[in-house]
Image (cartoon, rainbow, N blue to C red):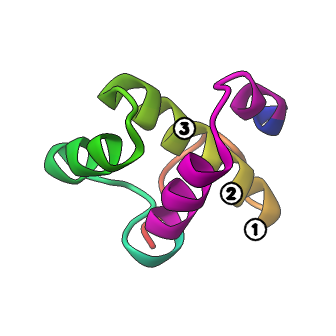
Amino acid sequence: MASKAMECLKLSEEQVKVLEENFNKVTKHPDETTLMLIAAECGLSEEETQKWFKLRNAVWRQAEGLPAETGMVWD
């Protein structure tokens, strides 16, 4: 379900690449400043970037066998 919602964001391959790199190498839960920097790097709004991270976290949690929405697992 979350991956279909991610497709609705209409991101370019380059934007997805930058977002995935940040998700995997920097943080799964960006703070306000980090979110702003990632958004600027991708050419997205902070809201779009935050939405992508929320959806991507749900996909990651499901892949780890965790509930998509409950609690928070820090990276």
Residue 32: say if magenta.
no
Q: Along the polypeptide, which appears first: circle 3 or circle 2?
A: 3
Image quadrant in which the C terminus is located:
bottom left
Mark 1 → mark 2, Cα distance in angstroms: 5 Å
Q: How crowded is mark 1: few (under 14 residues within 10 Å), some or many (20 or more)?
A: few
15 shown above or below 5: below
- C-beta proximity under 8 Å, tags 3 and 2: no
Residue at 54%, 47% in the rendered image = 15
* Closest to the observer, 54 or 25: 25
Q: Which numbered disc covers residue 64? A: 1
Q: How far is the residue under mark 3 from the one under mark 2?
A: 14 Å
* 61 to the left or right of 75: right
Q: What stretch is highlighted in magenta?
A: 4-23
At x 22%, y 42%, the residue is 36
Q: In this view, does 14 lie to the left or right of 50?
A: right
Q: Is residue 58 left or right of residue 20?
A: right
Q: How far apart are marks 1 and 3 (CA)?
A: 18 Å
Residue at the limit of the structure toward the bottom, as seen here: 25
Q: Which of 18 and 52 is in front in this view?
A: 18
Residue denoted by label 2: 61
The x, y position of residue 8, in whole percent, is 73, 22
Mark 1 or 3, nearer chain start: 3
62 and 56: which is toward the camera: 56
Is 18 inside the magenta-drawn segment? yes
Mark 3 crowdedness (10 Å alpha carbons): few <14, some 14-19, many ≥20: many
Q: Which label number is shown at residue 52?
A: 3
Looking at the rendered structure, the kind of residue marked 3 is Trp
- Mark 1 lies on a secondary structure that is loop
Residue at x-position 47% and y-position 54%: 72
Q: Are marks 1 and 2 in contact (CB under 8 Å)?
A: yes
